[in-house]
Image: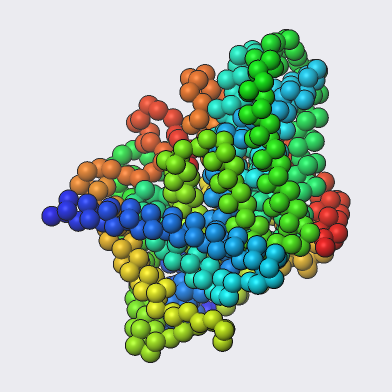
Amino acid sequence: MVGAAFSIAIVAILIGLILLSVPVVIALGLTSFFGLAYLTGNFQIAGSLLANTTYEAIRDYVFAVIPLFVLMGEFISRSGAAADLYKLVNRSMRGLPGRLALATVGGNAVFGAVTGVSIASAAAFSRIAYPEMVQHRYNKSVALGSIAGSASLGMLIPPSILLIVWGVISEQSIGQLFVAGVIPGILLAGMFFLFIVGFAIVRPQYFGDGANYVDEAHDNPAQKRKELIGGLGVTLLIIAVLGGIWLGAFTPTEAAGIGALLALVLAVVKGVTLKELSEAVLETGKISAPLLFLLITAQMYSRLLALGGITDFVQSLFLTIGNEPLLILLIMVAVWFVLGMFIDSVSIILLTVPIFAPLALTLGYEPLAFAIIGIVAIEAGLLTPPLGLCVYTVKACVSDPEATLSRIFLGSIPYWIILLLLVFIVAAFPELATWLPSKML
Amino acid sequence: MIERVTQLIETIGTSLKYIAAVLLIIVAILIAFDVVLRSVFNEPIIGVAEIVANGIVIIAYLQLSYTVRIGAMLRSELLVSKLGHRARVVFECFMSLLGMLFFGLIAWASYTPMVRAITAGEFEGYASFQVPTWPLRVTIVACSVLAVVTYFLVAYRAIALGETSYSTPDKDADSLPQGRH
């Protein structure tokens, strides 16, 4: 009853339902319910497991972290802080080749520290950076690629929804995971920087020939003050939220609650209207409710995985291939890459991490380092065809008819290659992820 | 008749969505107050953790009907984006049926615990702070039933009006796919 045949059937049914575009929540929930009913031979038992899970699964203080960080990001997005950051970074990069693309990366890195979803960054910078790059005769593919590519920073630099979900699924401390993401996030931004500078030196024609241009905002003190308020506000927010978590002053949930209120204050100071504020709150519900339901059904699913022996089956399958850690990691990355072609990142984590995380532990991977490796690998799927979510977001936010999907996908290629490079750098040097959390107070 | 039901469900779903939004703000304020009172005056608010924990589940369920109606539940549209209009209607109905089944199962399974919570007056929490369990139990059952009706209407809309909730247009459409959020 339990074992190979059952495992294969469950995986096949799940993949089939998801391919038929059944929402992942429903696919996971129904497969788990009927799987558990089959295993226990009793619908009443499966029913009471279902009732229990829907009541208990997310009934914990920790889960408030998801809507609250989303809310913080929504307030910040509407405050125009992304444009301020972009202009501030842009000004500080005077004289560097590929400056506008660099400012996109830098702005995204800072913006990523106040938002938990890449989509928010991709949308904001499409509207801010793209027109500017076009005006300065950047190659469109290069410009679009830099926007979609650097949006991936938001998912690695805390607070990040992916890190939260990973923490919940693998029962790791969300605070530690956040801190673990800091150095790899900065490293990733650094690698993007190096790539752009190098590319701009070799092919200056793609970056507007390094033309000198007038900075409109340069002589306008009112504009400068506005940018400074935005920049300062975001910096304070980052210090309060991440600093508070790192110093042990706040739990992630508390940091999220305070962060959301501080972001609200910043939005009000920046003149966001009441209507936009209520839109931010409603949008938060739209983004976070599906995530919370995914976490509910994910718990049914992990019960099925354990009871049905599926975890053991997949693990032994992996180990028959060999017990060379790097080889197994390569297979996992390949699985994530393929899954990234048809489902979203959160669903990928829910489906694979309950199986992969224990396996990685037995292979000797440090859990924090493995989490970062996984997040970075899964993020590459945000940029690859056919369904790269960041690419579609950029497409939806840019009205230029020449900004075709294929142009954006093409421009994004270097960025996901760099992401995959980072996967193996962290695998080789796990201290990049584990060092900072070990210094937590 | 069905128009009336649609109207009613949309109104209920939208109102619940607003209530959830207000609850979320209250949760944020509660947490912030708790942190400030605890660190400055060394006097935490009793029961914040319990209220927040229950509040989050209620917030999630209150959003359910609206989320279902606008098709915001995360799903793969790889195959659907390659299909024509008719096939998409079939897929939408299939998905809605499974959605009705799933949330129907939740309502069925949660019904007995709900009745027990009401009749026995169940409480949960620590000795210093106890919350009744029935508000959450009732929310789960009521919102799941609402989700079943909403999925039925999604299927009805697909069959009768040919409207589907996919974010990608069908292969006959000229415009390009839009981002999900």
Q: Toward which corner of the image does residue A167 lie, by quadrant?
A: bottom right
Res A19 visible:
no
Question: Where is residue A373 shown, x and y percent of the image?
Answer: 74, 52
Which image quarter holds the C terminus of chain A?
bottom right
Query: What residue is drawn where x is 28% and y is 43%?
Result: B163
Q: Nearer the viewer, residue A271 or A439?
A: A271
Nearer-the-camera pick, A393 or A16: A393
A129 vs B132: above or below: above
Color style of the picture = rainbow
Residue drawn at (48%, 79%), measured in percent from left and top? B131
* Quadrant of residue A46 within the rendered picture: bottom left
- Residue A147 drawn at (x, y percent): 63, 30
A233 and B21: which is toward the camera: A233
**Residue A137 seen in this snapshot:** yes
The answer to whether A19 appears left or right of A335 in the picture is left
- x and y, in percent, of residue B104 in the image: 33, 69
Q: Residue at x 78, y 30 (%)?
A: A193
- Residue A71 in picture, x, y percent from top left: 54, 50
